[in-house]
Image: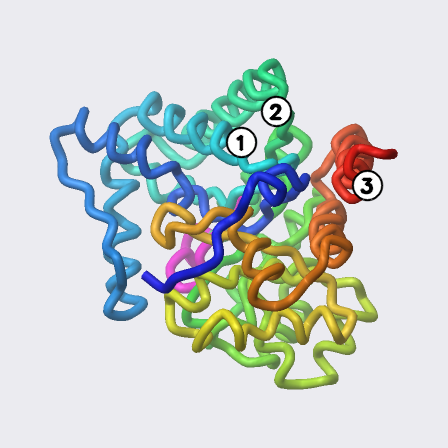
C-alpha cells in the first residue's frame, strides 16, 4: 500500500462533503470483519492489488457477505457514523442495489433498506453532535447494467426527494456505448436529479465530453484526464462542472503514477471545480480527510485552498439549504479558529 499523508485532528474537523464514495467499497473495515465473523466467512483486505481486476475480485466479496436486510442496514449505519466522525457534513454514496437484489428481493426493496438505514444513522449522529446529511447516488454500471438501466432510472426518479439525490453512472472501461443509458439519464433529469458520471479516469478527455453531451451529466466522477485537452478543461470551468477526484484510489489502481503527479492541482489552476474523495476507503485504507492531508502536504495547499476545495462540495444539488448554511458557518469558523 503506498504511503500517503494521514489527516490530523484539524483536517478531520474541517467540514467536508463526500461525493464520490462507492457504498460497497466504503463500509468501515471493522464492520465488515464483524459481519464476516458472524457469517463464518473469510474476509481479507490485500495490502496491494496486482491489477485492477484483482481489485474488482476483492470488491465483490463484501456484497457476498450480506445475507439479510439487517446485514445491509448495519453496514450502512456504520458507514454514516464513520463519515460523521471524519467531519463529513454531506455524504452521497454511490448505491448499487443490483449487487444485493437477487438475495434480498429486488432493487426497490434493497434501496428502501439503504435509505432507511441512512436516515436512522443520520438522526443518531445528529443527536450525538455530529450532524451529517445523507443522500443516495443511485448508480448503474455502464460496463454491466444495460439491461437494468431503465429500471434503475425509473427507480431513481421515483425516489427523488425521498432519499435519492442523484443518478450515477459508473465504469472502469470507459469505451462502452452510452446509448443504452440515455433513457435512464433522461428520466432522472426529468425528476430533477443530477446525472453524475464516471469519466476521465481510464478514458481521455473525449469521454468526459461524451458523458456531458450524451447523458447530460452535470458532475464528473474522476475527470482528471480532462487536463489533456484545454478545450475540455475550459468547458468544465465555464459550465461549473465539478470533478470529484480520488487521489489515493487513482494511485492504488495504477491510473496515476504517484500522488505528487496527480492532475488535480492542474484542474484547480485551470478553474475547474474540484472536490476530494476517497472512492473506496474500505479497500484503499485512506479516508476523505486523508485526501485533504495529501492536498496540504504533497500539493502545498494552504488552509484557504483546502477550504475552497471543501466549499466546492456545497454545489451538490442534493444538499439541503440548512446543511449548506451550517457548512458555511462551520467552514468560516474553521478558517478563523472559531472567530466568526
Q: How many marks?
A: 3
Q: Sequence order check: which comes first, mark 1 or mark 2?
A: 1
Residue at 53% x, 57% y: name it.
169
Is residue 185 toward the left or the right of residue 257 in the image?
right
| Along the viewing direction, whichever of 199 and 192 lies nearer the viewer | 199
For label 1, the crowd category at 10 Å Cα-Cα, with few meaning under 14, some 14 to 19 and many 20 or more, is some
The local secondary structure at tag 2 comes to loop
Q: Which residues are magenta?
A: 138-148
Residue 270, above or below 9: below
Q: Is residue 176 visible?
A: no
Residue farthest to the right, as pictured: 340
Residue 58, above or below 136: below
Q: Sequence order check: which comes first, mark 3 or mark 2?
A: 2
**Quarter of the image where the C terminus is located:** top right
Q: Are marks 1 and 2 in contact (CB under 8 Å)?
A: yes
Q: x, y (%) of residue 311? A: 75, 49
Q: Sequence order check: which comes first, mark 1 or mark 3?
A: 1
Say which residue label 3 marks. Answer: 336
Say which residue label 2 marks. Answer: 130
CA gap between label 1 and label 2 equals 7 Å
CA gap between label 3 and label 2 equals 20 Å
For label 3, the crowd category at 10 Å Cα-Cα, with few meaning under 14, some 14 to 19 and many 20 or more, is few
Say which residue label 1 marks. Answer: 85
Residue at 41% x, 71% y: name it.
173
Q: Is residue 284 visible?
A: yes
Residue at 55% x, 51% y: name it.
20
The answer to which image quadrant residue 337 occupies is top right
Whether the magenta-drawn stretch holds residue 280 is answered as no
**Quarter of the image where the N terminus is located:** bottom left
Q: x, y (%) of residue 294? A: 55, 60
Amino acid at each position: 500500500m503506498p504511503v500517503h499523508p494521514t489527516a490530523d485532528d484539524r483536517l478531520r474537523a474541517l467540514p467536508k462533503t463526500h461525493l464520490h464514495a462507492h457504498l460497497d467499497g466504503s463500509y468501515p473495515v471493522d464492520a465488515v470483519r464483524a459481519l464476516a465473523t458472524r457469517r463464518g466467512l473469510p474476509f481479507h483486505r490485500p495490502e496491494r492489488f496486482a491489477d485492477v481486476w484483482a481489485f474488482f475480485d476483492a470488491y465483490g466479496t463484501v456484497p457476498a457477505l450480506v445475507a439479510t436486510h439487517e446485514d445491509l442496514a448495519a453496514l450502512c449505519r456504520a458507514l454514516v457514523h464513520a463519515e460523521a466522525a471524519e467531519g463529513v457534513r454531506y455524504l452521497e454514496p454511490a448505491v448499487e442495489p443490483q449487487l444485493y437484489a437477487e438475495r434480498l428481493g429486488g432493487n426497490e426493496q434493497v434501496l428502501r433498506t439503504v435509505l432507511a438505514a441512512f436516515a436512522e444513522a443520520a438522526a443518531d449522529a445528529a443527536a450525538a453532535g455530529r450532524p451529517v446529511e445523507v443522500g443516495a447516488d443511485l448508480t448503474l454500471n455502464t460496463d454491466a447494467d444495460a439491461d437494468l438501466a431503465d429500471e434503475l432510472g425509473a427507480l431513481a426518479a421515483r425516489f427523488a426527494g425521498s432519499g435519492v439525490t442523484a443518478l450515477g453512472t459508473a465504469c472502469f472501461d470507459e469505451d462502452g456505448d452510452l446509448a443504452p443509458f440515455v433513457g435512464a439519464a433522461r428520466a432522472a433529469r426529468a425528476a430533477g436529479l443530477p446525472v453524475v458520471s464516471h469519466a476521465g479516469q481510464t478514458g481521455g478527455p473525449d469521454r468526459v465530453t461524451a458523458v456531458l453531451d450524451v447523458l447530460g451529466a452535470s458532475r464528473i466522477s474522476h475527470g482528471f484526464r480532462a487536463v489533456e485537452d484545454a478545450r475540455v478543461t475550459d468547458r468544465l470551468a465555464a459550465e461549473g462542472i465539478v470533478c470529484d477526484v480520488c487521489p489515493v484510489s487513482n494511485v492504488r489502481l495504477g491510473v496515476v503514477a504517484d500522488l505528487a503527479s496527480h492532475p488535480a492541482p492542474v484542474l484547480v489552476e485551470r478553474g475547474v471545480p474540484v472536490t476530494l474523495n476517497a472512492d473506496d476507503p474500505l479497500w484503499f485504507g485512506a479516508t476523505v480527510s486523508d485526501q485533504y492531508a495529501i492536498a496540504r502536504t504533497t500539493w502545498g495547499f494552504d488552509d484557504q485552498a483546502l477550504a475552497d476545495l471543501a466549499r466546492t462540495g456545497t454545489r451538490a444539488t442534493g444538499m439541503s439549504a440548512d446543511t449548506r448554511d451550517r457548512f458555511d458557518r462551520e467552514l468560516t469558523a474553521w478558517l478563523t479558529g472559531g472567530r466568526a
